[in-house]
Every structure is written in C-alpha cells, then in structure tokens.
Image: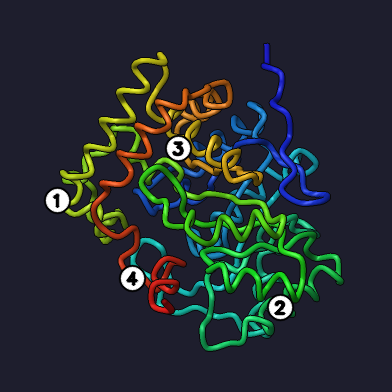
C-alpha cells in the first residue's frame, strides 16, 4: 500500500510542493554514467512515493536532463511542480565556461527549456547564477516578462547574496532561493537565510547531504576521474580526512535514533528551517529508488536540542571551501563585499 503523502509545503503563494523535492542533476553524468531507462524509473518512483517537486536545469547533461524529465511529465504533469534554471554555459562535469543573464538569453533559454520539457509552463524558473556583467534588474525584469506571458509561474534565484535577493525582490516577487545548505555548508545562515525569512521567500537547499559525503558512503579518494567533486576543495585528501569528524557526529546521532545518516542530515536541515522561520524544502538527488524512500523517512525524525547542538558544533570544524571558485557562490561574493 502506498503511504499517505506528507503535507505539502507552501514555498510561496500558489506554489505548494512536497516537503522533500528531487534534485535531477544526480541523473546526469556528473557523478558517472546512468542508463536513461533506469533514470526514468527513479523519477517515477519519486513521484509514486509522494515527491511532487522535481528540480532540473538547462545545463544538466547539456539539456538531456530536461528531456529525461519530459518523459515523466508526459503522463504525470499534473502531479509535478517543476523547477528548472537558466544562465550557465558549459558542462557541470568538466566546468562551466560562462554565465549569461542578459534579457535576450533569458528569452532564448526559456523557449529551449519549454521545448525540451514538453510543457507550456514552468512552475519555478531560477536564475542559476548571477551574471555580474549585467544589471540584476535586467535579468529579473526579463524573467518577470515570462510570468506575464504565462510561460513561468514563479521566479527563483540560485546562490545570490542577501543584497542581491533584496534587489531582485524589489523588481518582482521571488518565490524561492536555491543555494547549498547542509550541516557542512552553513554560510547562507549568516545573511541569505535571514533575508529570505524577512521577505517571505522560501528556501530550497541543494546538496543537503553534502554531495553524499554526510551519508558516510563516499570515499573522496576513490572518486572517478570525471566526478566533479574532485575539484571541490573540501573533497581534497587532507580536507576530506578532517571533515570525517562531521560524518562521525552525524552517524552517532543516527545510531541513537535508529535512523540513517542521510535521514539525520535532512532532519537537521528541516529543523533549521523552523529555527529561522521560513519554509525549507531540500532537494536530495539519488540514482537509487530505495534512497528516495530512505530520505522521506527524515520527515518523521525529531532531533533533540542536544542532538542539534552536537551537529552544530561538528559543522563548525568543517575544512575547505564548498566551491572551487568562491565567487561562484554567495559566500564568496559576500566576503569580497565586506
């Protein structure tokens, strides 16, 4: 028997999604190859399990991830709240070559995404990264035109600073910010999360399991040649060894609760949302159907204040940047501006 779905979360007025989403990037060659049929099976299982919020981007697999999701939407569009992104040029596996936020690119990108996805409307359309050469008002203004045209329902921003969020929100209401946020990536708590809470903007943490590291199943020394985590400083040998301490802390709490490390990491993040007073919908990605069921188990997990404090303390000792280029993410640009 299919379990009763968890209560929906309102990211923004008119945008209600499952309390956990699904990050589609995991189904592209970023972490290694995967057969399309198996990838589609994973997507169907996610929706069967009650995950209604599916996240992708035009850059994932050079557009192939959107085309994959189109097969899911063929018969299940009314069961899915669909998010995709524009702005990056290049390939996540080998490195991005550019960021484009000019109005012409926004209009061109959305048409391509709509075609690949086989849908008339995108529920949540993100600016994937900030193009510092283009006034933010131009990018968001072009995105707002898509809402007026009915091609997009809600606007989102990825890896923006608090100042950028405020500026964009003044041009058009922003429904959600998507940035990396997890036990070992807490920099957004300093400025971006409080700004989102103040403005009534939802938060969608990507890589909520630390790109797999927090689950205790990733050996950084054994990553494949094409695995892009090899370029992230905190996965380097010395940093990864030091960061094992946070993995151990998560595992200890999981043992006490008879849960998995993934469930504890997600439960901590959901608790952070309550602590900061804003809707938080993590989007863990996976290639394996049983991991989807495991992740959903986090929704029933309650951490004690002492357990939350222990995880907070472990997070303070994390070594290494979460990005190969600090300016690529909000933390680096906020530090540069301070």
Where is the C terminus found, in terms of image quarters?
Answer: bottom left
Between the residue at mark 4 and the residue at mark 1, the CA separation in whole angstroms equals 18 Å
Q: Could you say where residue 113 lies in the image, as x and y percent from the top left?
A: 66, 64
Label 2 CA crowd tier, 10 Å (few <14, some 14–19, many 20+): some
Residue annotated with mark 4: 325
Sequence-first disc among 4 and 1: 1
Colouring scheme, one of rainbow, by chain, secondary structure, one colour: rainbow
- C-beta proximity under 8 Å, tags 4 and 1: no
Where is the N terminus found, in terms of image quarters?
Answer: top right
For the point 57% across and 40% down, the residue is 275
Tag 1's secondary structure? helix
Looking at the rendered image, the disc whose residue lies closer to the viewer, 3 or 4, is 4
- Foreground residue, 154 or 100? 154
- Indicate whether 230 appears above or below 251: below
- C-beta proximity under 8 Å, tags 3 and 2: no
Q: Could you say where residue 27 lies in the image, as x and y percent from the top left?
A: 47, 46
Tag 2's secondary structure? helix
Residue annotated with mark 2: 107
Where residue 287 is drawn, which disc sits there? 3
Left or right, 20 with respect to 175, comes to left
Between the residue at mark 3 and the residue at mark 4, the CA separation in whole angstroms equals 27 Å
Sequence-first disc among 2 and 4: 2
- Foreground residue, 154 or 197? 197
Residue annotated with mark 1: 237
Looking at the rendered image, the disc whose residue lies closer to the viewer, 2 or 1, is 1
- Indicate whether 148 appears above or below 16: below
Sequence-first disc among 3 and 4: 3
**Residue 308 is drawn in which quadrant?**
top left
Where residue 6 is drawn, which disc sits there? none
Looking at the rendered image, the disc whose residue lies closer to the viewer, 2 or 4, is 4
Q: Could you say where residue 243 lies in the image, as x and y percent from the top left?
A: 23, 44
Between the residue at mark 2 and the residue at mark 4, the CA separation in whole angstroms equals 28 Å
């Amino acid at each position: 028997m299919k379990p009763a779905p968890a209560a929906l979360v309102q990211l923004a007025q008119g945008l209600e999604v499952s309390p956990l989403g699904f990050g589609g990037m995991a189904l592209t060659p970023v972490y290694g190859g995967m057969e399309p049929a198996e990838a589609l099976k994973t997507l169907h299982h996610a929706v069967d399990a009650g995950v209604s919020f599916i996240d992708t981007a035009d850059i994932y697999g050079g557009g192939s991830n959107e085309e994959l999701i189109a097969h899911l939407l063929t018969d299940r569009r009314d069961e899915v709240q669909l998010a995709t992104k524009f702005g990056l040029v290049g390939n996540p596996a080998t490195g991005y070559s550019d960021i484009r936020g000019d109005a012409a690119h926004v209009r061109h990108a959305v048409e391509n995404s709509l075609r690949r996805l086989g849908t008339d409307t995108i529920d949540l359309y993100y600016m994937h990264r900030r193009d510092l050469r283009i006034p933010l008002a131009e990018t968001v203004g072009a995105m707002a035109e898509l809402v007026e045209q009915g091609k997009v329902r809600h606007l989102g921003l990825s890896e923006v600073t608090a100042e950028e969020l405020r500026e964009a929100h003044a041009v058009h209401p922003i429904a959600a910010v998507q940035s990396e946020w997890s036990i070992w990536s807490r920099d957004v708590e300093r400025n971006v999360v409080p700004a989102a809470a103040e403005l009534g903007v939802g938060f969608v943490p990507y890589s909520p399991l630390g790109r797999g590291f927090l689950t205790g199943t990733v050996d950084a020394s054994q990553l494949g040649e094409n695995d892009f985590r090899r370029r992230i400083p905190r996965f380097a040998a010395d940093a990864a060894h030091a960061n094992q301490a946070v993995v151990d802390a998560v595992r200890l709490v999981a043992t006490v609760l008879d849960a998995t490390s993934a469930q504890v990491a997600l439960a901590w993040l959901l608790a952070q949302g309550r602590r900061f007073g804003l809707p938080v919908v993590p989007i863990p990605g996976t290639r394996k159907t049983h991991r989807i069921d495991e992740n959903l188990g986090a929704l029933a997990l309650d951490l004690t204040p002492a357990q939350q404090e222990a995880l907070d303390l472990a997070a303070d000792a994390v070594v290494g940047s979460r990005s190969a280029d600090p300016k690529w993410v909000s933390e680096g640009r906020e530090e540069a501006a301070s």
